[in-house]
Image (spheres, rainbow, N blue to C red):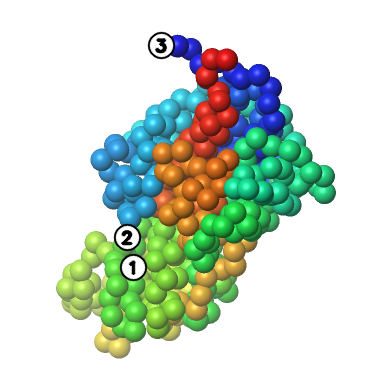
């Protein structure tokens, strides 16, 4: 097979954004085309990942290509070519080769530990630089100069630079304090692309009930939530939930927040929390109503302690007016009713989502219809490409968004280099 070779130095391929999508695009492009420049408005690369305050960063989940449809739903056919050509295996291997340690949870998840996130962007950038890219920090692209169906130049910090192609990898509007403001959408609109309106996703939810002052920080490891719209059940899920000062967060809320925010426009949304999903109402009733010896002073706290966190039990008197230090043997029937209801159906009325600065993703972005999934090239402007979260693509929790950014970035970079004549013999 003929070995591809780099072209002579022509005008640069400009990559806008030094996040995972932009850096992945740059590494792929520079292997085939000599002149690749990454512009990022921040003084440091991949700032979004550097700033993650807690949780390991999940970079991928082992997933066979026949499962893509389950994960990406109706966007599956768009993302499939990128993921099939470069999926979880290739991505985790590339990260390791760069010197970024990827841990495996023993099952299907791959993540970068908290202590390594601070150096992630720098290592990624250095790896791209060692391949020959030029990285321009603190360089904000403010405009694309488009003429006769082509991007002719980019305007960076007020100076116009001619280009051969442009990859827009500016990120979504999630967590905009890390640099991903709405610039990518503006570039796409200028090029004639449609923007699907953006909404917050992977974000905490504010509740009308004000339990935050005594429940802030309490985590329930395993609960079941029933989400209703105007009292009609919409869906059920089970997992970890965390109370916050404003309402609810934690894995189960972040995962379902986009779905909940979508239905919030239609009416009143409630989350009914079952705190003990493995205990049936019948079992709880039988326990509470059994004949306790009068000498039995075992408290509610002692009985419920295996199931509920101390932080929750400690404040149950403020929520249902039954103190957890009450001996179960002395509970009135009204108190038992309150306990049963609270355990199996702790209700929250959803007021809205937390602001964009707290989101970990968004719904919406550059519409996929006018982008070729095999190349990530715009159907409107022939030397313009899109990659990563700027697109109207959102995977579920579990590494799918990083994976999507990385693989679409690689495809966009490769295509930009190929379309510039890379690999062709002169
Ligand atoms: C708190 C948090 C936790 C997350 N956890 C996970 C997780 O565990 N697993 C997972 O898969 N995903 C996670 N994500 C999502 C993940 O970070 C994104 O999917 C990923 O960063 C998207 O990469 P990107 O390159 O498309 O965009 P970004 O990472 O947002 O990078 C875009 C870059 O473009 C630059 N830029 C924007 N406009 C311009 C301009 N005009 N000129 C120059 N530069 C510009 C920005 O400065 C930024 O550096 C998390 C996100 C957050 C906020």
Q: Which residue is depicted at the point 53% across and 31% down? A: 419
Q: Where 152 sits versus 288, above or below? A: above
Q: Which residue is depicted at the point 66% across and 48% down? A: 147
Q: Earlier in the sequence, mark 3 or mark 1?
A: 3
Label 3 SS: loop
Front disc: 2 or 3: 3
Label 1 SS: strand
* Foreground residue among 419 and 20: 419
Q: Earlier in the sequence, mark 2 or mark 3?
A: 3
Q: Where 173 sits versus 158, above or below? A: below
- Whether residue 206 sits left or right of residue 86 in the image: it is right
Q: Could you say which disc has been placed on residue 1 in the image?
A: 3
Front disc: 3 or 1: 3
Q: Which residue is depicted at the point 25% across and 40% down? A: 66
Can residue 42 be seen in the rendering of this structure? Answer: no
Give the quadrant of the N terminus: top left
Location of residue 188 in the rendering, given as x and y in whole percent from the top left corner: 59, 54
* Foreground residue among 309 and 212: 212
Location of residue 234 in the rendering, given as x and y in whole percent from the top left corner: 29, 72
Residue highlighted by disc 1: 225
């Amino acid at each position: 097979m003929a070995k591809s070779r780099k072209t002579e130095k022509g005008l640069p391929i400009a990559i806008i954004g030094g996040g995972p999508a932009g850096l992945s695009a740059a590494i792929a492009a520079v292997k085939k085309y000599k002149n690749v420049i990454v512009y990022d408005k921040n003084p440091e690369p991949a700032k979004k990942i550097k700033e993650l305050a807690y949780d390991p960063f999940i970079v991928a989940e082992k997933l066979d290509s026949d499962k893509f449809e389950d994960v990406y739903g109706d966007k599956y056919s768009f993302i499939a070519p990128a993921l099939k050509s470069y999926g979880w295996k290739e991505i985790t291997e590339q990260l390791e080769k760069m010197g970024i340690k990827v841990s495996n949870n023993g099952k299907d998840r791959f993540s970068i530990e908290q202590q390594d996130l601070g150096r992630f962007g720098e290592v990624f950038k250095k790896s791209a630089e060692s391949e020959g890219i030029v990285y321009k920090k603190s360089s904000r692209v403010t405009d694309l100069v488009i003429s006769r169906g082509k991007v002719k130049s980019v305007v960076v910090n007020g100076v116009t630079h001619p280009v051969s192609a442009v990859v827009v990898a500016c990120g979504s509007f999630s967590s905009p304090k890390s640099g991903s403001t709405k610039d990518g959408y503006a570039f796409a609109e200028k090029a004639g692309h449609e923007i699907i309106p953006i909404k917050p996703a992977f974000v905490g939810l504010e509740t009308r009930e004000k339990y935050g002052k005594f429940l802030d920080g309490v985590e329930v490891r395993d609960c079941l939530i029933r989400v209703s719209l105007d009292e009609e059940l919409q869906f059920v899920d089970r997992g970890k939930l965390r109370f916050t000062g404003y309402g609810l967060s934690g894995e189960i809320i972040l995962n379902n927040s986009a779905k909940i925010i979508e239905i919030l426009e239609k009416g009143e949304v409630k989350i009914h929390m079952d705190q003990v999903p493995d205990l049936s109402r019948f079992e709880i009733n039988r326990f509470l109503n059994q004949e306790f010896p009068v000498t039995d002073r075992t408290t509610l706290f002692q009985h419920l302690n295996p199931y509920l966190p101390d932080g929750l039990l400690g404040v149950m008197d403020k929520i249902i007016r039954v103190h957890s230090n009450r001996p179960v043997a002395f509970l009135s029937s009204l108190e038992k009713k309150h306990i049963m209801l609270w355990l199996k159906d702790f209700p929250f009325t959803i007021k809205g989502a937390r602001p964009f600065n707290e989101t970990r993703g968004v719904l919406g972005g550059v519409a996929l219809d006018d982008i070729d999934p095999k190349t990530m090239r715009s159907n409107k402007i022939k030397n313009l490409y899109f990659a990563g979260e700027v697109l109207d693509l959102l995977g579920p929790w579990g590494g799918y968004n990083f994976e999507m950014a990385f693989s679409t970035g690689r495809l966009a970079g490769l295509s930009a280099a190929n379309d510039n004549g890379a690999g062709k013999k002169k």
